[in-house]
Image (cartoon, coloured by chain):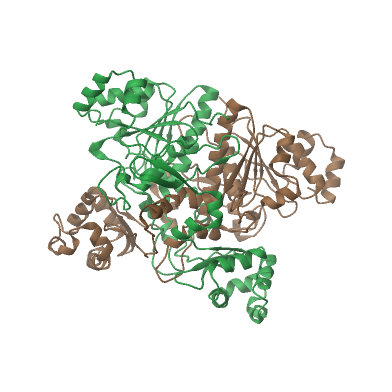
């Protein structure tokens, strides 16, 4: 069995909610030892999400998904002694990750300049919402609100109707992916050149990097798009069409002439395809509402999977709009194992998302479930830092390990 | 000091966004990225607007010019036997191949991983497809709207009785690209110790279904909860919503009760408004969000409609309330904060007016990010690569050109 890519690297994770924890999750999946620093004074809110109906912090499925493969220690960093302990831990670690508001780590005495004194080649990664510097750096943001600040939400709504927005956390999950990449770049850099560095993933910047089209459209033509519906100027057929059943929809997209002809064949070459309004792609784009209506008359007679089957047989892009239940039972996703089961001491069995990067030789994997609060205090404070059982007990009594 | 990825040779046999975004990230950090395009037509993004000066032309597409900066560009028809041989020759010397062939096609061309591994056992091959290398849908066709649909993103965007809305543009392609970049780094880190190449299987549908929405399926298994489309708000404690105000919309998300309380004090000019404090229905934020959100939207409306986004933003910042304006792209591109941070980069092309494009998604204190060369014109580096680098003769190049192999 090949060594895992990040085996032997130690990451100290001060993260909470999504951005930092999801980044370190990627690293943990690939073998890094990720130590999550928690405190009962201010528990990760993800331990008490909408699916955890108990008041028990060990029972949240989202927390279990994001924090599998990690270790947990408890430390109340408002105590100077706790800060001393964490500094000793950082001295024997490779990476520090945090997604606090700018300034918080400095208040703990754990900003990059301080950490560099402890370990000169430390790699520190921060995930400020809009950046640690600049006129907006004081603004508190959450993943979903960043979509508004970045202009993304302004384009999400039915064509020319009110803004609805993405209504989910895209920005911080996207930031996590970019952060994990950046951490690996820094590790690679350190392996080659021996130096560490400070990485800043300003979530709004990572987000904008995934939407160059409207940036460039404005940059070139000073045109700001409004709510778009499912419209794109690139394709006349590009929408979600109603199917048989309650709230069932199928997505269909046609780009090339070949695909259009294949689509016509697949739906049995009905007479309406021959009208002048649909004679070429420009005309179809101009008359897309009419076209959508006619396509809907066909899709409404079939289930989404039937539409997919009929169209994909001819090479036309069509997929059902799947909700959570659909995705769980989807035969392709089942075969691909998008979820894996892992035993968790509190919840019994969790079904959590699989490792996202599928590498043939070093595939990574789920080695352990999400940790219980402070589950690894003894290992970290005892084995790694050499504290005695008595010392650890005293720190617990004094609510420093808390 | 050289750039972080100096000396890493990447061959990019991929088009549009997913592969090229991955290539762009590696190129910016120092890798030598060589882009292979289909002869005569080139990368499909060359045909996407907006075009410089509104003139459609393969070298004037804003998207192509942005995503392919700093790469060398050659043409090659890898579906032809002669082209295939040339590709394998190119790959002998490469560290990474980014490719986006349908699995069936790669197999029929004998360009699937086992064949590539024969030629270069250390090669890291990243295969990017909509559904992955295995499974019943592996040879299905899909564009961004289709992977968003099956990946679970669309089912929760939009109004309850109307069609689901797809995330705009190509967010899914970019997610795929950054996941591919992560995977390449994992493979490079592994290869420092193992010395072997590997095959990496990247599926766009999974970038949504595993990484973005996978945990929601976990929740479904755990509690049976299924999320439906709920229009301008997300179910949960009030508020998690986008509401109209005098000159646009505000995004109002309060994860903590204290944040919501402070906002109410803003509306009430220093204390919680009577109409809120007196009303039993609003005592429990979760109950308010699940049952009385329409009522609350309506009650907040007078104050919101009397204030602009800017006014609301200023007041909220003062009181550390995390509500933000919904901005349009003009406001974003002209944003003082982003421009002071020098986030945007500019692309200049042959005397045309320069245009802004996104800059680096992450900032490093040491690793240098720079994209010095403009995106290549079609076949720009054919001579340099085929003759100077690979040692083919000018006559061979002319012959291949005639046969549309390059």
Where's residue A23, x and y in %? 44, 39
Q: Which residue is more in the foreground, A290 or B107?
A: B107
Residue B348 visible? The answer is: no
Q: Which residue is more in the foreground, B332 or A260?
A: A260
Q: Which of the 4 image quarters holds residue A84?
A: top left
Q: Is B178 on the left or on the right of B112, as rendered?
A: left
> Chain A takes which shade in the image?
green
Image quadrant holding the N terminus of chain B, namely top right
Residue B256 visible? The answer is: yes
Where's residue B185, x and y in %? 55, 35
Chain identifier matching the brown colour in the rendered picture: B
Q: Which residue is more in the foreground, B237 or B104?
A: B104
Q: Which of the 4 image quarters holds residue B47?
A: bottom right
Against B98, residue B328 (above or below) is below
Q: Which of the 4 image quarters holds residue B226?
A: bottom left
Q: Is B46 on the left or on the right of B276, as rendered?
A: right
Q: How many marks?
A: 0
Q: Is B80 on the left or on the right of A356, as rendered?
A: right
Where's residue B373, x and y in %? 62, 40
Where's residue B134, x and y in %? 62, 50
Against A312, residue B361 (above or below) is above
Q: Residue at x 71, y 40 (%)?
A: B114
């Amino acid at each position: 069995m090949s060594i895992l890519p990040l085996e032997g690297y130690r990451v100290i994770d001060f993260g909470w909610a999504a951005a930092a924890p999801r980044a370190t999750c990627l690293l943990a999946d690939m073998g890094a030892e990720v130590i999550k620093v928690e405190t009962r004074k201010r528990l990760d809110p993800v331990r008490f999400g909408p699916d955890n109906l108990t008041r028990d912090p060990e029972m949240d499925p989202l927390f279990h998904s994001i924090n599998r493969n990690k270790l947990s220690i408890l430390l109340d960093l408002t105590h100077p002694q706790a800060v001393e302990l964490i500094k000793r831990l950082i001295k024997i670690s490779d990476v520090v990750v945090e997604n606090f508001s700018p300034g918080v780590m400095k208040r703990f005495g754990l900003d990059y300049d301080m950490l560099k004194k402890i370990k000169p080649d430390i790699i520190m990664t921060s995930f400020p919402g809009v950046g640690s510097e600049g006129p907006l750096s004081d603004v508190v943001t959450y993943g979903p609100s960043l979509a508004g600040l970045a202009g993304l939400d302004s384009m999400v709504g039915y064509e020319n109707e009110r803004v609805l927005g993405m209504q989910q956390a895209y920005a911080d999950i996207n930031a996590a992916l970019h952060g994990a990449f950046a951490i690996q770049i820094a590790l690679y850099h350190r392996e080659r050149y021996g130096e560490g560095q400070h990485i800043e993933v300003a979530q709004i910047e990572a987000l904008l990097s995934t939407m160059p089209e409207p940036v460039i459209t404005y940059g070139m033509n000073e045109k700001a798009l409004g709510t778009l519906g499912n419209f794109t100027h690139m394709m006349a057929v590009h929408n979600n069409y109603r199917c048989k059943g309650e709230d069932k929809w199928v997505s269909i997209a046609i780009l090339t002439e070949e695909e259009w002809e294949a689509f016509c064949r697949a739906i049995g070459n009905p007479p309406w395809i021959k009208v002048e309004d649909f004679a070429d792609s420009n005309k179809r784009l101009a008359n897309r509402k009419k076209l959508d209506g006619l396509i809907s008359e066909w899709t409404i007679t079939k289930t989404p999977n039937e539409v997919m089957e009929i169209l994909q047989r001819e090479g036309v892009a069509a997929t059902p709009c799947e909700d959570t239940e659909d995705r769980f039972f989807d035969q392709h996703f089942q075969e691909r194992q998008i979820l894996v089961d892992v035993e968790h001491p509190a919840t019994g069995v969790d079904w959590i998302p699989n490792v996202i990067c599928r590498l043939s030789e070093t595939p990574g994997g789920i080695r352990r479930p999400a940790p219980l609060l402070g589950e690894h205090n003894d290992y970290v404070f005892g084995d790694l830092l050499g504290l005695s059982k008595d010392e650890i007990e005293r720190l617990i009594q004094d609510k420093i390990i808390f | 000091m050289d750039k972080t990825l100096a000396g890493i040779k990447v061959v990019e046999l991929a088009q549009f966004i997913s592969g090229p975004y991955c290539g762009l990230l590696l190129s910016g950090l120092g890798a030598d990225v060589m882009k292979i395009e289909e002869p005569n037509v080139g990368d499909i993004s060359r045909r996407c607007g907006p075009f410089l000066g509104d003139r459609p032309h393969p070298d004037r597409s804003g998207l192509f010019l942005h995503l392919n900066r700093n790469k060398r560009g050659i043409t090659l028809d890898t579906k032809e036997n002669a082209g295939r041989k040339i590709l394998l020759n190119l790959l002998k010397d490469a560290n990474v191949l980014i490719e986006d062939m349908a699995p069936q096609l790669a197999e029929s061309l004998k360009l699937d991983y086992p064949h590539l591994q024969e030629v270069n056992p250390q090669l890291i091959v990243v295969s990017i497809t909509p559904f992955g290398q295995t499974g019943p849908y592996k040879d299905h066709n899909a564009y961004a709207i289709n992977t968003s649909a099956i990946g679970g993103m669309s089912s929760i965007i939009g109004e309850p009785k109307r069609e689901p809305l797809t995330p705009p543009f190509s967010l899914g392609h970019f997610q795929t690209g950054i996941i591919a970049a992560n995977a390449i780094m994992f493979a490079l880190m592994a290869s420092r110790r193992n010395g072997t190449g590997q095959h990496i299987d990247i599926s766009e549908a999974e970038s949504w279904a595993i990484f973005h929405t996978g945990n929601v399926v976990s929740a479904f298994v755990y509690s049976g909860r299924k999320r439906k489309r709920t229009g301008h708000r997300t179910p949960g404690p009030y508020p998690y919503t986008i509401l109209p105000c005098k000159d646009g919309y505000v995004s109002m998300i309060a994860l903590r009760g204290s944040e919501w309380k402070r906002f109410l004090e803003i509306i009430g000019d220093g204390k919680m408004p009577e109409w809120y404090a007196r009303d039993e229905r609003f005592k429990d934020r979760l109950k308010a969000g699940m049952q009385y959100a329409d009522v609350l939207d309506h009650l907040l409306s007078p104050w919101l409609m009397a204030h602009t986004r800017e006014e609301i933003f200023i007041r909220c910042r003062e009181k550390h309330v995390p509500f933000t304006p919904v901005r349009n792209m003009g406001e974003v591109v002209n944003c003082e904060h982003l421009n002071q941070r020098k986030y945007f980069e500019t692309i200049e092309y042959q005397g045309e007016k320069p245009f802004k494009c996104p800059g680096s998604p992450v900032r490093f204190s040491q690793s240098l990010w720079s994209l010095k060369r403009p995106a290549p014109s079609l076949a720009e580096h054919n001579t340099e690569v085929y003759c100077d680098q690979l040692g083919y003769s000018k006559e061979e190049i002319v012959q291949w050109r005639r046969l549309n192999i390059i």
